[in-house]
Amino acid sequence: MYAEILVPTDGSPASDAAIEHAIGLADRYDARLHALYVVDGAAYSSLEAGAEVVVEALESEGEKATKRVADAADDAGIECVTSVTSGTAYQSIHDYVDEHGIDVVVMGTHGRKGIGRYLLGSVTERVVRTSDVPVLTVRQSTDE
């Protein structure tokens, strides 16, 4: 059913919840896991000096975040491919899905209460609304 599973990560606790589910799916279906971190450098392009430093720091954070996924996958005996890319997050996720034949995307959501519980988060919500493949959203526990 699923041979290629994508888990976009931003290193947050919501991503961690999704990673756990993605590894479980990969184990169940003997699938390969893909860990993706998107650096949105455009958000910092208005900085006169220092934008490059910010982007480099985000790329470094992306390497750490995807390595955490790869290490967790390795501990579970799951093959994992990592990628850090630049662009608009939801569009970069769609591009990755298309380029790598992804069968399902597993993304985290924040465990919010009240009116906030109706909001998935801008990136997750846009991916859910526009994806051509199934998107599994995993809610971060309110305890985290």
Image (spheres, grey):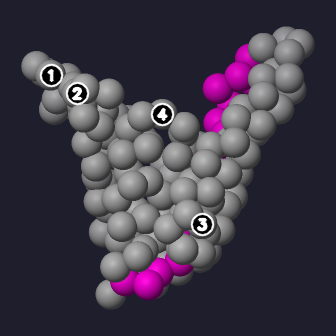
Residue type of the residue flagged with mark 4:
Ser
Residue 142: which disc? 2
Q: CA distance from mark 1 to mark 2?
A: 8 Å
Side (left or right) of 87 relative to 55: left
Side (left or right) of 88 relative to 7: right
Residue type of the residue flagged with mark 1:
Lys
Mark 2 closeness class: few <14, some 14–19, many ≥20 residues within 10 Å: few
Residue that carries the numbered disc 1 in the rendered image: 113
Quarter of the image with the N terminus is bottom left
Give the structural element (helix, strand or loop) at label 3: helix
Height in image: 57 above or below 11?
above
Q: CA distance from mark 3 to mark 2?
A: 28 Å
- Mark 4 vs 1, N-terminal side: 4
Q: CA distance from mark 1 to mark 3?
A: 34 Å
Residue that carries the numbered disc 3 in the rendered image: 74
Q: CA distance from mark 4 to mark 1?
A: 18 Å
Image coordinates of residue 27 in percent, x first then y, are 41, 76
Height in image: 43 above or below 123?
above
Residue that carries the numbered disc 4 in the rendered image: 12
Image coordinates of residue 38 in percent, x first then y, are 62, 45
Give the structural element (helix, strand or loop) at label 4: loop
Q: CA distance from mark 2 to mark 4?
A: 13 Å
Image coordinates of residue 82 in percent, x first then y, are 67, 61
Residue 11: which disc? none
19 drawn magenta: no
Q: CA distance from mark 4 to mark 3?
A: 20 Å
Where are the magenta residues, as a range? 29-46
Height in image: 8 above or below 42?
below
